[in-house]
Amino acid sequence: MQNNIFYLLPHSKLPLLISILGTEKFEIIGPQSIDGSIVYEKIENVDQLPWGILDYQWPGIYRLENTDINKAFIFTNGPQALKPYLFRAQELLFEVEKKENKNNKKKLNFIPAKEEAPKLAFIGARACDLAAMAIQDKIFLADTHLDIYYRSRRENLFIIAVNCIRSSANCFCASTGDGPKVTKLYDILMTEIEENFVVQVGTDNGKRIIDQLELSHALPEHIKEADEYVEQAGLQQTKKLPDTNLRNLLFSNLNHPRWNDVAKRCLSCTNCTQVCPTCFCHSSLEQAILDGTKSGHYRVWDSCFTCGHSYIHGRVIRDDTRKRYRQWLTHKLGSWYDQFGTSGCVGCGRCITWCPVGIDITEETYAIYDNQNNDKEIIKEIIK
Amino acid sequence: MNSATKPKIAVHKFSSCDGCQLSFLNTGEDLITLSKLVDIVHFAEAGILSPNEKVDIAFIEGSMTTSEEVERIHKIRENSKYLIAIGACATAGGIQALRNFSNSNVEKWKNKIYERPETINSLPTSTPVSAHVNVDLEIWGCPPSSSQIYTTIRCYLSGVTADIPQDALCLHCKRKNIVCVLVAKGLNCMGPVTKTGCGVLCPSKDRECYNCFGPAENINCLSLGKRFQELDLSNEEISRRFLLINNSAPAFKKWGEYFKKMAHKENII
């Protein structure tokens, strides 16, 4: 359900929302200012929210500023949001135990990990985060290879989304069509205006919570104020991706000199892929206890920038940075369409900010777009 | 398992601070479990001495800085099925390999520093084990991680080779949800060129990585060095970031010397 009722939630009633979520046995995750960044961690009261904190982002640089602006969600984003709560950075999948039976025969017992997930209320998911979650849903909830652990966490997730009222210098969600306005996948949606939030509900669960707050309806001027803030956030964005078929562009420029150029700057350090809210590559890790009677099989975040990622039967296929960066970009903006029917980029700008040397995905794509060495034969092949 | 069938291991010390041997010993209950799985036949720090015994695995701590050590490492190689170098000294020559950069000034220093320099018999260089004998596996770090050492032994007992990650520290930092100190604070963190394995010790304590685990695979020291220039580090300072504990690891040596040369040029101008 998604309806057109707009409620007005005063800042002063935010503590009540938190306590209702607590009563409903939700573990509450919200944004906080930790270690010089906005980090989503467990919160217990509204004072922990980043009131008045502005983030400034440039390629390879992230800084916070404390202001006396009376808003909790005036920041844009931090390195992570929803992804680590759904697709865990390290997750036990199964354990193996070595047992001896009555006839002294050794046997291996495989014990799958339990699919237990706490009820989680996530406050502050943005349009890009939800667009990315929709993409990860396609990956982890596909019928053909359903991930039961992701599913149980996803089913227990209650989303309080927040519309962006500001964009950073690295945001480009308007150009990918994923933001700044939240349009889907929320239980509750809030837009922060002066002293209040304009609130909408997206699900019955969301409505049930909001009903308990006994809110009045927002007035047209509140709704107008909220719309203007969000519109303004979109207009603030200066970065964009080329408005073209990016898949064909990149695959017809596989030998473009720009790949060599970016390889000179790229550290192959994996940061872009780790902060990307859609990147889903992982590897497995076997951890045996010392006496060898038990072993845990873990799934851990991996990256197409590691040698292990393309290590196949005795050799590393992508043995240099040029090949690795090209793999990342052509997958993200190109073959992602073939795999999932969508782009793998939601315009959050995290890969630009958290790249230690500030490599900019939009700049790299434009460098190829503006100086294409299209191979007609290759294009024919791709379009087929 | 009775003692006759238990694999034998030895832990040998060369030029080093003994810290790697402590990584071996500081494991609590696991040390007791280990003693049931293997026969530790030689381990000076633990008080067990039988340096010439034939063993399944010899762990080597320390670098080669005297002719006696060079001779000894060859003997150990002959006596060992597997030879595993542990720690920055054994894998890269250690902090003492800074002497390698001094164009044989070692003799001069010796005479200045020691009362009886004639009693000191040291080579002009400090070199890793791999410069002298074939090494089966290297476990980097200053000190190396106890968990990597024990995992290696477990893997040997199970008949497989341990997989020591060669990825950059950044991968681990992100997995642990630690905010990047380079991007958010402008610290000159060596994480992007440093092998993971420490458990992200420094960045998780709000400090920059200083590369004690040596170079990761497929690194770009020039690009990181240029980033440090933007962070207002002088070329001399950048050079020192590379020429520290793993100064003689080939990648760090090359780029440390590169930035040193740049600094030198500036001084001339």
Image (spheres, coloured by chain):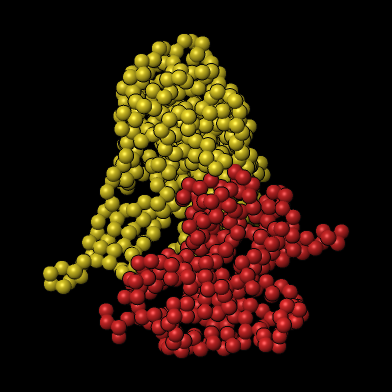
Chain colours: A yellow, B red
Q: In this view, does A110 lie to the left or right of A42?
A: left
Q: In which quarter of the image is residue A7?
A: top left
Q: Nearer the viewer, residue B25 or B95?
A: B25
- Residue B3 appears anywhere in the view: yes
**Above or below, comparing residue A222 to residue A191 in the picture:** above
Q: Quadrant of residue A299?
A: bottom left
Most extreme residue toward the right is B269
**Above or below, comparing residue A357 to residue A41 in the picture:** below
Q: In which quarter of the image is residue B16?
A: bottom right
- Residue A267 appears anywhere in the view: no
Q: How many marks?
A: 0
Residue A29 x, y percent position in the rendering: 41, 35
Q: Which residue is drawn at 73% across and 78% down?
A: B113
Residue B81 x, y percent position in the rendering: 43, 83
Q: Residue at x 51, y 11 (%)?
A: A221
Most extreme residue toward the front is B115
Q: Residue at x 46, y 50 (%)?
A: B175
**Above or below, comparing residue A66 to residue A383 in the picture:** above
Q: In this view, does A211 lie to the left or right of B191?
A: left
Q: Residue at x 56, y 28 (%)?
A: A52
Q: Nearer the viewer, residue B47 or A183?
A: B47
**Above or below, comparing residue B86 to residue A341 in the picture:** below
